[in-house]
Amino acid sequence: MDWHQQYIGKVKHAVFHTQKTGRKRVLVSTEENVVASLDLRHGEIFWRHVLGTNDVVDGIDIALGKYVITLSSGGSILRAWNLPDGQMVWESSLQGSKASKSILNIPKNLKSDKDDLILVFGKGCLHAISSIDGEVLWKKDFAGESIEVSHIIQSPEVIYVAGFVGSSKFYVYELDAKSGELLKNNHIALPFRTSGESLYVPDDKFLVLDDARSKIVTININNGDINYNQKQISDLVKDSSGQAVILPSRLPGLSALKINSQVLLIKVTNEGELAVVDKIDNTAAFSNALSISEDQHVFAFVQYEDNKIHLSIKDVNDWSRDLLKENLVIDHQRGNIEKIFINNYVRTDRSHGFRALMVMEDHSLLLVQQGEIVWSREDGLASVVDVTTSELPVEKEGVSVAKVEQNLFEWLKGHVLKLKGTLMIASPEDKIAIQKLRLGSSEKSKMTRDHNGFRKLLIVLTRAGKVFALHTGDGHIVWSITLNTLRKSEDCKHPVGLNIYQWQVPHHHALDENPSILVIGRCGPSLSAPTALSFLDAYTGKELNSLSLAHTVARVIPLPYTDSTEQRLHLIIDFNKHAHLYPRTPEASEILKHEFSNIYWYSVEADNGVIRGHALKSNCIHEVVDEYCFVFRDLWSIVFPSESEKIIATVTRKSNEVVHTQAKVMTDHDVMYKYISKNILFVANAAPKASGDIGTATPEEALLVIYIIDTVTGRILHRMTHQGCQGPVHAVFSENWVVYHYFNLRAHRHEMSVIEVYDQSRADNKDIWKFLLGKHNLTSPISSYYRPEISAKSQSYFFTHSVKAIEVTSTAKGFGS
Amino acid sequence: MTLFRSILAVTLFLTFFITLSPAFQSDELLLDDEEFGLEGGRPQSRPSPNIATTTTTPTRKRIPDSASDSKIQFTLEHAFGDSDFSEAGNFSARLKTWSHGAQTLTKLRFSRDAFTAVEKNKFQELLKGDDFYRIRLPSNVLSPPGREYIVSSVKARCLAGDGLEEHFVIHTEGVNILAVNYGAPGACPYPRQLKLPAKWSFKSHTLLKNTEQAPRTPIFTEEVLGGEGIEGELIKPPERSFWAKYWMYVIPLGLIVMNAVTQAMNMPEEQAGGQGGAPQQPGTAVQRGTNPGVRRR
């Protein structure tokens, strides 16, 4: 194995574990459903668990000082992991009747040997669980009470469960902590509707906004009595235009209210009175409170000011003084700071020091201490949307040295280091530097094209809208860029990166032109959202151009034609069944006109069980004739019977794949000619009953039907049924073969099959005399309209492992194919 | 007493046999019946309740219970370029209903309507424009058009050869048509030449195609599961023959025995020469004695 990288994804929750003994670590749960323990010093992963795709982590905390507790799957699965090694200690599945907010509440007890209760609210039920073995001690069902529970508050004797019924009745239940018995049930009806969000302010108050967001309401629960105070926001601030939002930071005695870009910090007195403590402008993120001693609670916030980032840490009670104020320099490519978590440590001078974990807009994770980034993780790479490859630059004679060694000084330094190394006077740091230099100049990680085409750039588009270029030799990041078209903005609230294509691959000017990449994005998840295109330089990552399109994008078809600058022609099919040609140049339009009748494509309607073939028809007729817009027609359709088959996988060949040998010599010296077509599609269908998870269907009702389809004419070239088998199907199509992986229910095992398609019409070209006399048909053009004379050979093998993805290697000379 | 007991035993055995045998027989019959239906597709002359419950296909209502196959017809429609579809011909097939409820199409026949003058004109226009000639079929032959039509198209210039020659390969799944491979038999690579057909009659070839079964991977789950099932439980190797087990003992033993036998064979000879020969020795001696004696004579 050359290299292996592990990522965790965008961090949702983080819990620090900094005991005096042992290594310091931070526990995180992420949007990719990963639970991980990271080294606080270097950011490496101690352990990591990737939960299932439906097993979304709702909460993470530490119990007993040795267990990591995670609540997932909408509050129905509670697990304890051993803190040092990440092994699962116990798992409880919690039953409930209705979906609800899920809350994990673990009391912070300084004495860790006591058997703490874990309180979990999920699926309309409150569970008290022993943290030692995960046993459910008692359970109280709130499903019948129609209450939207939003807070669970634990005091040593009593548990308070608070929430709204409807939008104006606030209920508080008091439960006995030992038995879960209902002690008291109290409620208050507010004379107005609320916005629904509420904040708990220790020790016994809740803050609520009314639904016009103009009043702040303090609800006070004192020994079972509930009363409320209200105050107009305009009384607190003069300029209160704009929506007020309560920030969900838990700060004792303090609450944060965000109005526009300003954050008001409001002190809640014991009598329920509100007073503005401070106004902070341009805030990016607030942390929760961290208690550093019995009565000292601190919190952190980040401010943006003239391209500078300030991190401030303040005491909740003593507002006048900054415990820490630091300026940070963070790369613009990382975007805004979205979340911040703080942790304290004791400095060498015995004062309090603080470090902050920051989650950035591009999903990366930073640890900041003393105003510097101690480590960073590019966790955007955990959620890759699309990948393409790019060839590296051709090696130029004599230039490569200057490329590797940036300048003369660097070059000299390198030589001095090497000299030191040979004279054995190098210090350990020098040795590391020498190692790095050697690695950098080693054959594997060179930034130039190799003879066999093993070295390439992997261009990766992540869910955060960041594009990375990774080197295949050692996996290092060559460049990365956050695309402006894929960043959140006023016009585009939820941008989505869709696809990445090779836009321009220079062959004729490979020495002096860089290839470029096309990134396609959309504003929002719906198909009707507007489209944005970005063009990037594949070697430097610079954005060359970006376009916002008037039309939508449903599908992108790279055509097998390039213009004189070697830009590839692309057809973008929109939501309204129009095809748009890119690049929008007269030359491209001319090329398309010439090849107009040779352009075919297909579309798969997986839900409907229909595959259709299309061809271009004519220009769009709007008010004026748009030369780059076309309408198309359906040429063929394949309709799978919906009662017996459901499309679960479709795979085609890579469009840029090169086939190096067109025949295969069999063991008996026979020659078989490969049936090689670019327009070929593999489809796997499963019985509708057996299209769920493994184990939900019996072998009798499971069925896997596979098809090989010519996408120009819609002909089924091969069709085969695997009885008693089901998906998930992972397949790869290359040259004339397809390999697919599925589950055999009869044998209780995964199985892999290969189908090779051979061309029978060329089968007689075996006589050497025919070759000499030119009487062979090997050079005759192949047409999809030819009646296919093919033979398909199939073999199946048991394969003990499950598969997540399957790909085929591609090298310059067709190694291993 | 013993006679009485034996009679009792015989009657007991007989009653046992009699009570057992009918149940046993009926079981076997049922099994046999089902299997027969599966393999041969014998017409269900006697409707048995057991089989009737297994046929649950919703389309079954259309076919009378007694008949196993019925004739069915569906139309082929065609369109010239982007024109609307119109009727072009008729497919007829036999719908075979198997006893387990599945239905398949067999014996496909096709009769094509000749082109009318208008259609000929349209087709010639297609040839000039190198445009598509399109056909469509229902996706369900019992309730056409089913969910949607199955469409296929071919460049008109591909069809026009000497006459008009076309190939239909219809992929079916029960009463559903999945797809139709439609086209001309010969090659027609781009760029296609304009050529008007000499004759305006279609030569049609049709073929029904059903799915192939994938070669089954041998399932040795039983053994493997037994082997993997519980750790520590040893897999018993199959009982080997006596020879396979004990040849290493048997052969040396055999050798020893043979050795002993040959020795024993030799021994008696020697002994016959030594011990048993003692009374004869005088005889030999007599002979020896006599021979010289004879020579002497």
Image (tube, rainbow, N blue to C red):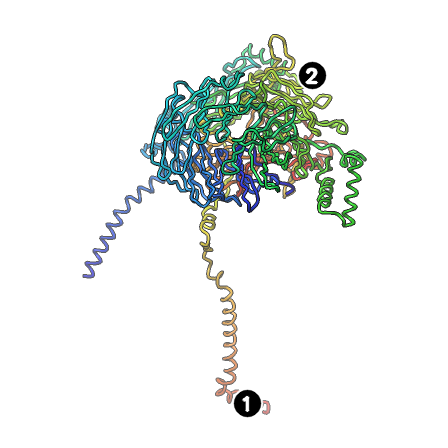
Q: What's the amino acid at mark 2?
A: Thr
The span from disc 2 to disc 1 (Cα, nearest Å) is: 137 Å
Relative image position of residue A477 (x, y in whole percent): 66, 34
- Badge 2 local density, few (<14 within 10 Å), some, or many (20+)? few
**Chain at numbered mark 2:** A
Labelled disc at residue A788: none
Q: Is residue B197 visible?
A: no
Q: Name the residue at the top extreme.
A: A623
Relative image position of residue A805 (x, y in whole percent): 57, 36
> Which image quarter: residue B62?
top left
Residue named by callout 2: A585
Labelled disc at residue B290: 1
**Chain at numbered mark 1:** B
Q: Quadrant of the C terminus of chain A?
A: top right
| Viewer-proximal residue among A707 and A393 | A393
> Which image quarter: residue A787?
top right
